[in-house]
Image (cartoon, rainbow, N blue to C red):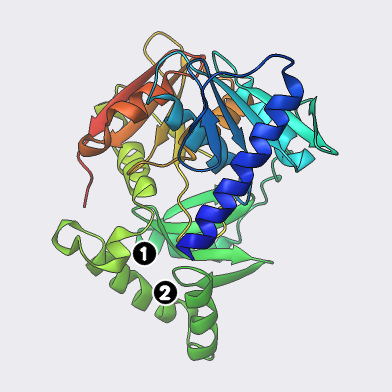
Amino acid sequence: MLLDEERRSSLNRSKLRKILYEENSQELGNLTDTSGNGIRDNSTLWVIADGETPESLLGASLLELTIQDNLDLVIYFENLENAQVTQRRVSVLNPAPSIFFLSDGKPVSVEPVSIPDRTSVKTAPPEFDEMCLEFGLEAICECGIWKGEILGLEVMRVSDGEIEVGVGKFDREANSLIGNGKPLPEVLSSAVEIVRSSRNPESEFHPLSRLVRERWLRADAVANPEMFGFEHLTYVDPPRERDSLRETMPAAASGIDKTGKRVLLVFSVGVDICLIPFIADLMSMELPDRVEVVLPEKDILVPVEKSLGYLDIPLIIKGVAGGW
C-alpha cells in the first residue's frame, strides 16, 4: 500500500511539472518535492488534488506553507465543484491562494460556489423536550435535526418525527431492535447511565470519553460563558452535517462581547487539517467581527498558530483544560 501511495504521489508530481513547464516559457528553477502531492521552489508551493476532500487538501497545504515563510500557494483541481468550493474558502484568506480547475489538462480560473442554504428548523416533539428535561440532556438543533446530548455526545435524536436513542447510527439501530417494546424513557435511561459513567475525568481512556471532544469543549463553554468573557453563548451549526462520530470536525458557538462585537468561537482538538476551511465557511455564513479558536493547551502548536494567521480577520487562540 505504501508503495502504491508513493507511486501515486510521484505520478501527481510529474503531472504538476508538466503543467508548470507548459505554463512557463522560461526554465523553472530547482523544484523540491513536498509531502503529499506538492512541489515547491523558493517562492511558490504547487499542489494538485488527488483523492483528498477539498477541505483536507486546503488545510494540509496551508500547514505545509508554515514550513517555509513567504511562499505563494497554487492548487490545481480536476474536479470543478471542489475547485469552486475551495475558491470560496480562500476568499477569506490573506494572502489568498490561487485556485485552478484543470480543463483538458489546462488550468482555468474558477468562480466560487455559494454555501447551500441551511435547513429550516422544525419544532421538536413535546416528548423530546420532556425527556431532555427529565434526563438532563442539552437539546440542540443542528442542521435541522434535534439532538439530546451529554457533554457534546448525542444520546437521542428526532428522525422523521420519531425519537431514536443511541450514540451514533449503529447504536440507534441496535436500540431500535433490542429495545422494541420497551418504554422509550427506559431505553434512554440506560443510554444516559452508560454515557454519564463513561464521559467524565475519571474515565478518560473509555472510548465514549474520547469521542467528539471538540463538542465537549463547546458544551463546557456554553455552560460557563463567563469564563470566556461572555454573558451568553449560542450553538452555531457547522457548514454541513458530520458524516459520523468518527469524523473529525470542529464545533462552533457565537456570542456578543462587552464592546458589542459579534464573536465566533471555534473549538478543536489535536491538529485538525480541516480547521481553517471550517472557519472560512462559517466566516462567510456568520459574518463575525472576531474569531476565537479554543484548543487544549497542549494542542497550541506553532504550525497551527501560523496557519490560522492566514485568516483575514482578527483572531486569537485560547488554551483551555479539557473536561476529560
Task: Identify the residue shown where x is 51% and y is 76%.
Answer: 170
Among the 4 quarters of the image, the one containing residue 107: top right
**Callout in the foreground (2, 1):** 2
Kindly state the secondary structure of the residue where label 2 is placed.
helix
The foreground one among 223 and 17 is: 17
The foreground one among 106 and 56 is: 106
Kindly state the secondary structure of the residue where label 1 is placed.
helix
The foreground one among 200 and 232 is: 200
Q: Is residue 55 left or right of residue 121?
A: left
The foreground one among 176 and 29 is: 29
Q: Is residue 94 above or below residue 292?
A: above
Q: Which mark is residue 188?
A: 2
Q: Is residue 28 above or below residue 126?
A: above
Q: Are marks 2 and 1 in contact (CB under 8 Å)?
A: yes
The span from disc 2 to disc 1 (Cα, nearest Å) is: 8 Å
Q: Is residue 28 visible?
A: yes
Q: Is residue 82 above or below residue 276?
A: below
Mark 1 = which residue?
135
Q: Position of residue 83 (x, y in %)?
A: 72, 35
Q: Is residue 310 above or below residue 105?
A: above
How packed mark 1 is, by other alpha carbons closer than 10 Å (few <14, some 14-19, many 20 or more), is some
Name the residue at the left extreme.
202
Residue type indicated by callout 2: Leu
How packed mark 2 is, by other alpha carbons closer than 10 Å (few <14, some 14-19, many 20 or more), is many
Task: Identify the residue shown where x is 75% and y is 22%.
Answer: 23
Q: Position of residue 93 (x, y in %)?
A: 56, 19
Q: Position of residue 96 (x, y in %)?
A: 59, 17
